[in-house]
Image (cartoon, grey):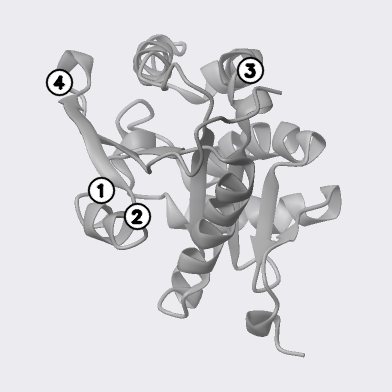
Amino acid sequence: MDHAEVGPELAVPADVPSLVVTCADAFSDDAMIRWPMPGATPAMLQELFRVILEPYVEFGVLWKIGGCDGGAAWLPPGVAGRFDEIEQSARAAINPLTDDGGVRYARFWDWLGAHLPGEPCWFLDLVAVAPAAQGRGLGRRLVMHGLDLARADGCPAFLETSTPRNVPFYRSLGFQVVDEQRAPDGGPMIWFMQTRAYQSTCRRD
């Protein structure tokens, strides 16, 4: 069966090297990555995503599709509430990849973390499709898969993007812009988007 015909599957540790390349290529010009790490080389971006993705595989929140042509990290409420802990633990490895010892990176991601909703939600931390595989609907399927998980849980879903063309894409899947702000120190414009809650209650763990 063609990989493109298989729906999202949980990633396993053996998938990490391929998903690292997918994410590094997909985010090579993304402002949320490039602004705090302006001088990052392709190898540095791959190291960044290795540090990010390995814990997500351990937590069982990283999904793949099309082999490893696409990947998404969907954090459920119990993990989303620990997002800061996960992200903070990675900074010691990320700081050497920056040109200022991680100062701008820390300030930017602390600011983003402060915008996470107070109520339980499913958080789309990242979705990436390899440039050569874009246009096949892999990203849409990864997002819709997470929305199905949120719907089954009775929770809203939340995401952050710095890419203007992503806003109508996410709107087509049920997200609405709940805020838009420019990051501190002249950083990129960020759109904060959320879906409605699917039920009156959402589990918290």
Q: Which residue is mark 1?
A: 163
Q: Is residue 145 left or right of residue 168?
A: right
| Quadrant in the rendering for residue 79 | top right
The x, y position of residue 26, in whole percent, is: 45, 57
User: Which is nearer the N-term, disc 2 or disc 3?
Assistant: 3
Q: Which residue is mark 3?
A: 82
Task: Tell me if mark 3 has few (under 14), some (14-19) or many (20+) residues whose alpha carbon lies within 10 angstroms of its own.
Answer: few
Residue closer to the observer: 2 or 91: 2
| Whether residue 162 is visible | yes
Residue closer to the observer: 19 or 123: 123
For mark 2, give the secondary structure. loop
Amino acid type of the residue that numbered disc 2 sits on in the rendered structure: Gly
User: Which is nearer the N-term, disc 3 or disc 4?
Assistant: 3
As drawn, the label of residue 174 is 2
Q: Are marks 3 and 1 in contact (CB under 8 Å)?
A: no
Q: Quadrant of the C terminus?
A: top right
